[in-house]
Image (tube, rainbow, N blue to C red):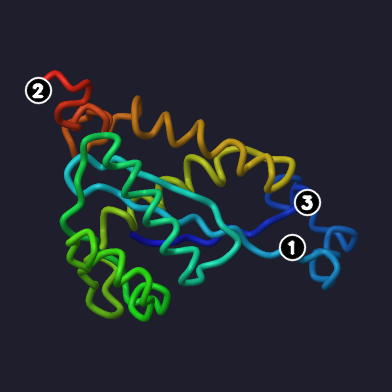
């Protein structure tokens, strides 16, 4: 589990328009700053199936609600979590409601070594792919348009995009008992 931060914008900037003139510098004015969207993500270790939600913060309450919905989503795909790995962010390590949720579901909370993002490599790599293929691959008119594209990209990532780490198969192909045929 990890989060990535994406700047909000109301119109494309110089990266898209190529205009670095004084007119485009008004983004520095306090009135034009619109904050960030935080992409909270969980990636299953075996299948590489990913669940993502965009939120306006990284607060403990937001993180716990996200984890509840993610666990339900994974359970809907026949995946039962036994362990959850995160970095040492305050909202993961000092979050009483998350600690209680994981204890109630008998999920062991693993933490990465400080300053060692490689330990949580699968979700870190997922964020890199998401940044390259979703957030910065197209010229969006605003962050609203970018956010609307996330569910479509995520569906493609989980069901059609080949992953070299799992034999050039999409993650959904590694989900066991996908249609309940083994019950």
Q: Mark 2 points at which residue?
A: 182
Quarter of the image holding residue 8?
bottom right
Q: Position of residue 113 (x, y in %)?
A: 22, 77
Q: Which of marks 2 and 1 is in front?
A: 2
Q: What element carries label 3?
A: loop
Tag 3: Cα neighbours inside 10 Å, few (<14), some, or many (≥20)?
some
Q: Is residue 17 left or right of residue 71?
A: right
Q: Nearer the viewer, mark 2 or mark 3?
A: 2
Q: Do the residues labelled 3 and 1 touch (CB within 8 Å)?
A: yes
Q: Distance between the residues labelled 3 and 1?
A: 8 Å
Furthest residue in direction right, as rendered: 23
Furthest residue in direction left, as rendered: 182
Q: Mark 1 points at which residue?
A: 34
Q: Is residue 136 left or right of residue 76?
A: right
Q: Where is residue 88 in the image (x, y as percent from the top left)?
A: 33, 77
Total count of labels: 3
- Which residue lies at the image location 37% right of the left edge and 54% below the top edge? 68
Q: Is mark 1 on a helix, strand or loop?
A: loop
Q: Do the residues labelled 2 and 3 touch (CB within 8 Å)?
A: no
Quarter of the image holding residue 91?
bottom left
- Which residue lies at the image location 63% right of the left edge and 62% below the top edge? 36
Q: Name the residue under label 3.
A: 10
Q: Where is residue 182 in the image (x, y as percent from the top left)?
A: 9, 22
Q: In this view, does 175 lie above or below 128?
A: above
- Which residue lies at the image location 30% right of the left edge and 36% below the top edge? 76
Task: Return the disc, 3 or 1, that comes first in the chain's sequence.
Answer: 3
Q: Do the residues labelled 2 and 1 touch (CB within 8 Å)?
A: no
Q: How far apart are marks 2 and 3 (CA)?
A: 49 Å
Q: What element carries label 2?
A: loop
- Which residue lies at the image location 53% right of the left edge and 62% below the top edge? 5
Q: Is residue 115 above or below residue 56?
A: below
Q: How far apart are marks 2 and 1 (CA)?
A: 49 Å
């Amino acid at each position: 589990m990890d989060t990535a931060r994406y700047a909000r914008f109301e119109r494309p900037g110089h990266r898209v328009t190529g205009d670095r003139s004084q007119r485009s510098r008004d983004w520095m004015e306090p009135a034009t700053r619109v904050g960030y969207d935080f992409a909270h993500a969980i990636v299953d270790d075996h299948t590489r199936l990913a669940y993502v939600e965009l939120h306006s913060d990284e607060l403990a309450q937001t993180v716990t609600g996200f984890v509840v919905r993610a666990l339900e989503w994974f359970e809907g795909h026949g995946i039962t979590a036994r362990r959850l790995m995160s970095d040492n962010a305050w909202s993961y390590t000092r979050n009483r409601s998350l600690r209680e949720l994981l204890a109630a579901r008998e999920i062991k909370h693993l933490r990465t070594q400080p300053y060692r993002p490689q330990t949580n490599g699968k979700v870190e790599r997922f964020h890199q792919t998401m940044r390259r293929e979703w957030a910065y691959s197209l010229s969006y008119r605003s962050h609203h348009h970018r956010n609307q594209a996330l569910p479509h990209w995520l569906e493609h990532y989980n069901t059609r995009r080949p992953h070299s780490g799992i034999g050039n198969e999409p993650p959904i192909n590694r989900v066991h008992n996908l249609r309940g045929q083994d019950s």
